[in-house]
Image (cartoon, helix red, strand yellow):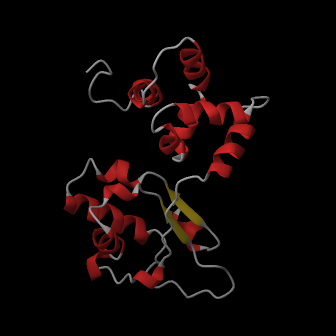
Amino acid sequence: ILETVQRGGCVLVFDGLDEVLVKMDRAQGNRFTSLLWRAITPLPGAEPRTDVLSPKLVLTCRTHYFRDLRDQLGYFTGRSREGIRAQDYVAFAMLPFSEDQIRRYLAANLPGADVNRLMDTIAAVHNLRDLAQRPLLLRLLSGQLAEVEAAIAAGRAVTALDLYDGFVWQWLDRDDGKHTLLPDH
């Protein structure tokens, strides 16, 4: 893989950096990330190439993994020990979805659904609009909207807590095999 990377024109994607780092102490995490950076660093003695694009590295991470922006910047610059500068990379943050994006998501992922009715359902539950702005939660929520509509039609109160209960079970099912505790715990 590294030989292919060194030939250039590659993009290495490491998705879920925070999911790995959370299982390591700070020193181990720093060494791990340093290894990732080395994957795109030219091998010692390699001739510089101008005929191909240099390899790129994409790391994904939840922003709340870091205490604050200073901690995040320090981490991704190797705390000034790795020769990496802030201008050596671009950081992107996924913003919450707008109402239009939520509507387009629902239309694309729930074919034939009445998007206006679904938006009314989302508006009827306290704080559900806030949850729907988050892409992962919107995906999980879209699988529960029929149940939410049925509960509202039956006169039952629906809260974000009810939805989170369903989300947690979906997460546990999705991540089966990763658990160190049993889902019932």
Q: Is residue 161 left or right of residue 70?
A: right
- Image quarter for residue 32? bottom left
Q: Position of residue 82 (x, y in %)?
A: 32, 79
Q: Nearer the viewer, residue 3 or 97?
A: 97
Q: Is residue 183 left or right of residue 119?
A: left
Q: Is residue 109 left or right of residue 55?
A: right
Q: Does residue 155 sit above or below 80 in this rendering?
A: above
Q: Is residue 121 left or right of residue 85?
A: right
Q: Please state the total of marks drawn on the protein image.
A: 0
Q: Nearer the viewer, residue 159 or 135?
A: 159
Q: Does residue 180 sit above or below 56 in this rendering?
A: above
> What residue is at 55 percent from the left and 71 percent from the top?
56
Q: Position of residue 95 (x, y in %)?
A: 52, 59
- Image quarter for residue 152? top right
> What residue is at 57 percent from the left and 73 percent from the top?
55
Q: Position of residue 112 (x, y in %)?
A: 79, 29
Q: Nearer the viewer, residue 139 or 121?
A: 121
> What residue is at 56 percent from the left and 73 percent from the top?
6
Q: Does residue 126 sit above or below 2 in this rendering?
A: above
Residue placed furthest toward the top = 154
Quadrant of the rendering where the N terminus is positioned: bottom right
Quadrant of the rendering where the C terminus is positioned: top left
Residue placed furthest toward the right = 112
Q: Nearer the viewer, residue 148 or 4?
A: 148
